Image (spheres, rainbow, N blue to C red):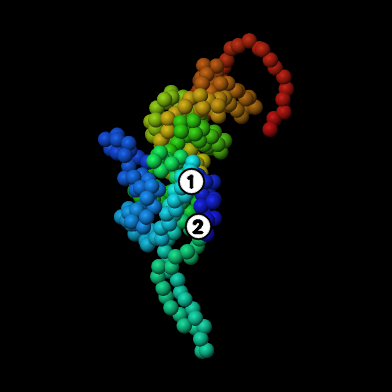
């Protein structure tokens, strides 16, 4: 079972994490030191220190757990896998001549070999060390948040997202939310998409961006609902405008009279002048001026 878990870890552990530095900025981390010490000196004592760290932060909900620490040290590669399986309860039934002898037992391990937490680290050598790894949590239900004590408290880590990856995730979620939203929310999200381009270079989360742009609760919920995991909404990344424009390059507006207007998202407000018709009305007048460079017919979707 452990061999299969270890072999599949490089593809199964798909949540990239990185160790947190000290509060004063020093590149030191208690959990990282424990893990590297085990790689250098894989003894019972070194493993017990890791287990003690996990025991100190395990929540009451998680209860007793069984910990495996596997070190794989080769000439040009070293890997460390740490896995936790939860304890459970069970009943032993032994058949007898006149019935069954039932015995209730606690601390049953491996009731399900598919419920576990796992993290994998890799480096050129134990001396070279590592600053990030890959984790997975199979003990939470699909769509639930990662266990905070596992990532934040035991591993002393945080989610790691590059600027391009975080920006792409937000742009795709925004685009998908706009396709599904009602007209009012869709217009709000389009306006937000235009303003988001001004966040270039800033490091923040989707939650912080939604708050800064003062998105309504409906728009915020629509955006959050397009993410594969809830915790991604609060994961920080550096906004990449070029990456954002790759996925939301054009803005389109379709009117109930059949008109369809398309322009570069960054320039839409300049290309099309919009004015409401009547106070508080959802009816708008769009106007633009330009030379015809191409026209023709095309099929609709």
Which numbered disc covers residue 74?
1
What is the crowding at mark 1: few (fewer than 14 residues within 10 Å), some, or many (at least 20)? few
Q: Which mark is residue 2?
A: 2
Residue drawn 47% across and 27% down? 240
- Residue 190 position in % (x across, y down): 51, 29
Q: Residue at x 66, y 12 (%)?
A: 292
* SS at mark 1 in the image: loop
Asked if disc 1 and disc 2 are in contact, CB closer than 8 Å, the reply is: no
Q: Is residue 121 visible?
A: yes
Judged from the image, the secondary structure of the residue bearing numbered disc 2 is helix
How many neighbours does mark 2 have within 10 angstroms: few (below 14), some (14-19), or many (20 or more)? few
- Please tell me whether mark 1 or mark 2 is closer to you in this view: 1
In the image: residue 82, left or right of residue 297: left
Give left or right: position of 260 versus 45: right
What residue is shown at x 68% (from left), y 15% (from top)? 294
Q: Residue at x 50, y 62 (%)?
A: 112
Q: Position of residue 81 (x, y in %)?
A: 45, 50
Q: Is 247 situated above or below 81?
A: above
Q: Note whether 39 is above or below 20 in the view shown.
A: below
Residue farthest to the bottom, as pictured = 98
Kindly identify which numbered label has been placed on residue 202.
Answer: none
Q: Is residue 300 above or below residue 83?
A: above
Q: Give the mark nearer the N terminus: 1 vs 2.
A: 2
- Which quarter of the rendered picture does the C terminus lie within? top right
């Amino acid at each position: 079972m452990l061999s299969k878990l270890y072999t599949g870890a490089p593809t199964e552990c798909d949540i990239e994490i990185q160790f947190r530095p000290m509060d004063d900025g020093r590149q030191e981390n208690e959990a990282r030191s424990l893990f590297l010490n085990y790689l250098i000196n894989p003894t019972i004592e070194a493993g017990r220190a890791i287990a003690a760290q996990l025991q100190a932060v395990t929540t009451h909900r998680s209860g007793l757990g069984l910990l495996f620490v596997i070190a794989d040290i080769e000439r040009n590669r070293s890997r460390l896998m740490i896995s936790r399986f939860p304890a459970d309860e069970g009943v032993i039934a032994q058949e007898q001549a006149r019935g069954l002898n039932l015995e209730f037992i606690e601390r049953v391990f491996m009731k399900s070999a598919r419920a576990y937490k796992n993290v994998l680290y890799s480096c050129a050598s134990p001396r070279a060390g590592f600053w990030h790894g890959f984790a997975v949590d199979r003990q939470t239900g699909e769509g639930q948040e990662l266990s905070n004590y596992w990532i934040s408290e035991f591993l002393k880590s945080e989610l790691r997202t590059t600027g391009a990856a975080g920006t792409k995730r937000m742009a795709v979620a925004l685009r998908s939310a706009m396709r599904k939203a009602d007209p009012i929310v869709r217009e709000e999200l389009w306006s937000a998409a235009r303003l988001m381009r001004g966040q270039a270079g800033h490091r923040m989360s989707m939650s912080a961006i939604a708050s800064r742009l003062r998105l309504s609760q409906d728009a915020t919920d629509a955006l959050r609902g397009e993410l594969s995991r809830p915790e991604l909404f609060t994961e920080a990344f550096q906004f990449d405008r070029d990456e954002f424009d790759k996925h939301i390059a054009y803005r389109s507006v379709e009117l109930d009279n059949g008109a369809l207007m398309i322009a570069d998202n960054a320039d839409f407000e300049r290309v099309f002048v919009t004015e409401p018709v009547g106070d508080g009305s959802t009816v708008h007048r769009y106007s633009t001026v330009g030379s015809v460079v191409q026209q023709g017919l095309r099929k609709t979707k």
